[in-house]
Image (cartoon, rainbow, N blue to C red):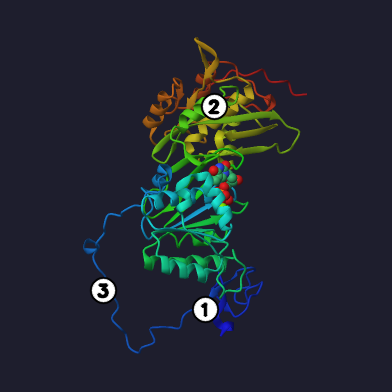
Amino acid sequence: MARNATAHVCSACGHAEGRWHGRCPGCGAWNTLVEERAAAPERHGRSGPSRGPRPVPLRDVRAEALARLSTGLGELDRVLGGGIVPGSLVLLGGSPGIGKSTLTAMALAHLQAAGRRTLYVSGEESPAQIRLRAERLGEGALDIPVLAETDLGAVLATLEAERPDVVVIDSVQTLHASELTGAPGSVGQVREVASAVMRVAKAAGTAVLLVGHVTKEGALAGPRVLEHLVDCVLQFEGERERTYRTVRALKNRFGSTSEAGVFEMRQDGLVEVLDASARFVGEATGKPGSVVLAAMEGTRPLLVEVQALVSPSELVPPRRVCTGIDRGRLALVLAVLGRHVGVGTGTADVFVNVVGGVRVEEPGADLAVALAVASAAKGVALGQSAPDAPTAPVPLACFGELGLTGELRSVAHPERRAEEAAKFGLGRLLAPPEVPTLSGALRRAFADEPLATSDPGRHHPPRDGAITHAPRRPVA
Ligand code: TYD
Ligand code: MG
């Protein structure tokens, strides 16, 4: 019996084997066999065609407005699309130590206080450890019912008996289905755990928050195989050493995927950062290499500081290090800078950082990266000192996508970005269409200062002669 309870199925070709093979005997691919519960016997064995269910016109389908369960964390609710949908399945991914257990415990504490039935299942920590965390989060968190268990069968039994409104499974990688031989966290186990929890939860109308660990490579490895199964995939990111954390939706059946919520990790849990722009602008240095990007996080404008450092390099090829922006995008910006405005960085290491551990994944960040790099290469600050406060320069704000021919292209919500910059006292804003080219933006940013960079030998003169160059060295 036990022999046939599971099968090892190739994820590439679907070939099934009784036991695990490193190489699929069906298609020859390596490492593709994944343990699964053996398929249930065919049910449609009756002879003759049977009449299937009748399709219904969409007009006749009843769609009730989804009641939402508020987590008490406005930032999380917004990313979820207005709160947790009853009976839904949400996957929350993030690297270890980022605060997933803290976030989910805080949400449950609020729901419990609001009279909902909750359950916190932990396969990672003992009840005593969970209590210690809860003590930091305040009185309410101590009312959460917890179950420290790694056996899937036991968890399912408790779920069926308790029928909570919301359950947190922390984490999906630590639960273990005893029918499968694979280790906890293996693809087969993770898939089985998620689908079994989903079956029981859907029947009981329980909303499930599945916590999943992300590997070093950044993929929701293991949990990634669940993406098609769940209603919503949330990514909790940031750097452990820093205080800011963002939660964003990668997939959401009940809301937008462009929203992001910002939190700060404090001694007593996560605190929503509602005035993120004010913080980032307040912390912006305004020194050479610093510029403020008027970004959009979903429907909300957000001002973040982009910093760059350009330093002579002995390495070939030199270093390109960036956090918070896409590497490919940085390469593009450096190429356009070198090719169209004569800011060469071919013999320099370039570091670009979005301050505060924020990620900006939008083309509107290009101009900020370009201006930060140019400012760093030149060693000239872009901030302007106000006459009354000469020691605290007001940073330059900007946004815009960079085209391959050096033009600046419009991005979404220009008015909202400009309003946000004005709101925080950033009077100087460079953006298309007022500034149509990168060379124009640099000219305005540097107020016609000559542009000399660390890589003078590789300059290509700009076509429109916008930038004055340091004289070329004669070739030896
Ligand atoms: P945790 O939620 O356990 O992270 P995860 O479940 O994602 O692995 O918390 C991560 C870190 O946050 C931990 O190192 C301690 C810190 N922390 C605080 O700074 N303040 C707090 O109130 C809590 C609960 C944790
Ligand atoms: Mg945890």
Tell me if 160 is positioned left or right of 472 in this view: left
In the drawing, what numbered circle is on residue 283?
A: 2
Query: Mark 3 or mark 2: which comes first in sequence?
Result: 3
- Is residue 314 visible in the rendered image? The answer is yes
- Is residue 402 visible in the rendered image? The answer is no
- Give the secondary structure at mark 3: loop
- For label 3, the residue is 54
What's the CA distance linking mark 1 and mark 3?
Answer: 30 Å
What's the CA distance linking mark 1 and mark 2?
Answer: 57 Å
Amino acid found under the numbered disc labelled 2: Glu
Residue 7 in which image quadrant: bottom right
Tell me if 407 is positioned left or right of 129 in this view: left
Query: Mark 1 or mark 3: which comes first in sequence?
Result: 1
In the drawing, what numbered circle is on residue 237?
A: none
Residue depth check, mark 1 versus mark 2: number of the one nearer the observer: 2
Q: Quadrant of the N terminus?
A: bottom right
Q: Quadrant of the C terminus?
A: top right
Above-or-below relation of 375 to 157 = above
Residue 29 picture location, percent across and down = 62, 69
Residue 142 picture location, percent across and down = 48, 51
- Give the secondary structure at mark 2: helix
- Give the secondary structure at mark 1: loop
Residue 279 picture location, percent across and down = 49, 29
